[in-house]
């Protein structure tokens, strides 16, 4: 089981920092967390239903709410709050940042969308 031992948010950097029990740590930009939210609003309800979220370059995190011992609910300043970010998902996002971010930027370009609001 993956367990986070420290979670901090830098408003100035708009970055979430998470440290895990095994010593691993990740830094996750708020924009990245917002566009990769595990919520049904972003991921859809089945295969092929994922939504490309555009216009979130300046999004921040207003609140971090613990959910049991396994996750947090992030409340973004665009009022998105329906995704539960498990420790395992946060670690996965950190480990796959470069690949996922490149894919996200390619999706935006292919759809004629922008990171800007």
Image: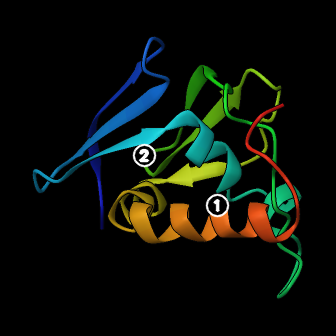
As drawn, 87 above or below 5: below
For this rendering, which residue is in front, 87 or 106? 106
User: Which numbered disc, 2 or 1, marks the residue that appears first in the sequence?
Assistant: 2
Q: Residue furthest top?
A: 12
Q: Residue 105 — which label?
A: 1
Q: Nearer the viewer, mark 2 or mark 1?
A: 1
Instruction: Give the x, y percent position of residue 106.
Output: 67, 69
Quadrant of the frame with the C terminus? top right
Q: Residue furthest left?
A: 23
Q: CA distance from mark 2 to mark 1?
A: 33 Å
For numbered disc 1, what is the local secondary structure? Answer: helix
**Dot 1: within a 10 Å radius of its alpha carbon, few (fewer than 14), some, or many (20 or more) residues?**
some
Which of the 4 image quadrants contains residue 5? top left
Residue at left offset 64%, top offset 57%: 36
Which of the 4 image quadrants contains residue 6? top left
Instruction: Give the x, y percent position of residue 47.
Output: 82, 88
Instruction: Give the x, y percent position of residue 19.
Output: 23, 42
Residue at left offset 53%, top offset 66%: 102
Instruction: Give the x, y percent position of residue 84.
Output: 64, 50
As drawn, 32 above or below 78: below
Quadrant of the frame with the N terminus? bottom left
For this rendering, which residue is in front, 88 or 28? 28
For this rendering, which residue is in front, 33 or 23? 33
- Is 33 left, or right, of 4 in this rendering? right
Residue at left offset 86%, top offset 83%: 46
Residue at left offset 31%, top offset 40%: 18
- Do the residues bearing badges 2 and 1 touch, measured as CB atoms within 8 Å? no
- Is 28 left, or right, of 34 in this rendering? left
Q: Residue 69 — which label?
A: 2
């Amino acid at each position: 089981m993956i367990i986070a031992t420290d979670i901090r948010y830098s408003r100035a950097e708009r970055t979430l920092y998470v440290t895990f029990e095994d010593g691993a740590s990740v830094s996750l930009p708020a924009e990245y967390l917002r566009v990769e939210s595990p919520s049904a609003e972003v991921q859809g309800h089945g295969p092929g239903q994922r939504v490309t979220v555009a216009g979130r370059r300046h999004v921040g995190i207003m609140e971090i709410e613990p959910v049991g011992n396994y996750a947090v609910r992030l409340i973004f300043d665009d009022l998105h709050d329906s995704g539960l970010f498990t420790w395992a998902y946060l670690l996965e996002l950190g480990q796959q940042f470069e690949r996922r971010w490149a894919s996200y930027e390619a999706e935006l370009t292919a759809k004629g969308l922008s990171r800007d609001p």
